Image (cartoon, rainbow, N blue to C red):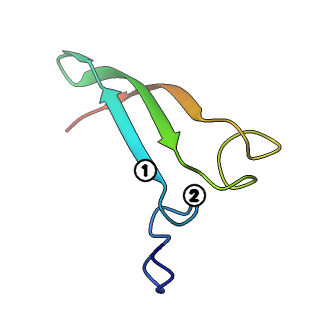
């Protein structure tokens, strides 16, 4: 087991692994745009209390975002 200062780079505990998938489609008309984002992270080997959710025991987290604006 790696116990060096860099062993917990992700913050989920030593030896943990994380995989992330993100998709960000965008639509633009003249100066205006709308962009959506869907992202999910899956953690394996997380130490109890350092993962997702109120108790830190969840193995995944999903995020959805909608952004609008003017691009110039």
Give the Cα separation between the discs numbered 2 and 1: 8 Å
Q: Is residue 40 above or below residue 27?
A: below
Q: Residue at x 57, y 57 (%)?
A: 12
Left or right for 3, reference 70: right
List x then y, in percent, for residue 58: 68, 36
- Please rate how many residues cluster around mark 2, counting C-alpha atoms within 10 Å: few if below 14, some from 14 to 19, many from 20: many
Q: Nearer the viewer, residue 67 or 50?
A: 50
Q: Is residue 47 above or below residue 40?
A: below
Q: Which residue is mark 1?
A: 17
* Position of the C terminus by quadrant: top left
Q: Secondary structure at mark 2?
A: loop
Q: Which mark is residue 5?
A: none
Q: Secondary structure at mark 1?
A: strand
Q: Which residue is mark 2?
A: 12
Q: Count of labels shown?
A: 2
Q: Residue at x 43, y 50 (%)?
A: 17
List x then y, in percent, for residue 56: 74, 47
Q: Going from the N terminus, do you reach mark 2 or mark 1 first?
A: 2
Q: Nearer the viewer, residue 4 or 39?
A: 4
In which quarter of the view is residue 11 placed?
A: bottom right
Q: Residue furthest front?
A: 1
List x then y, in percent, for residue 64: 51, 24
Q: Residue at x 48, y 35 (%)?
A: 42
- Please rate how many residues cluster around mark 1, counting C-alpha atoms within 10 Å: few if below 14, some from 14 to 19, many from 20: some
List x then y, in percent, for residue 31: 22, 25
């Amino acid at each position: 087991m790696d116990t060096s200062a860099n062993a917990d780079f992700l913050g989920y505990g030593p030896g943990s692994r994380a995989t992330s998938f993100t998709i960000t489609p965008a639509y633009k008309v003249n100066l205006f745009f709308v962009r959506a984002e869907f992202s999910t992270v899956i953690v394996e080997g997380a130490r109890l209390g350092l993962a997702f959710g109120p108790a830190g025991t969840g193995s995944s987290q999903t995020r959805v975002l909608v952004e609008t604006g003017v691009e110039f």
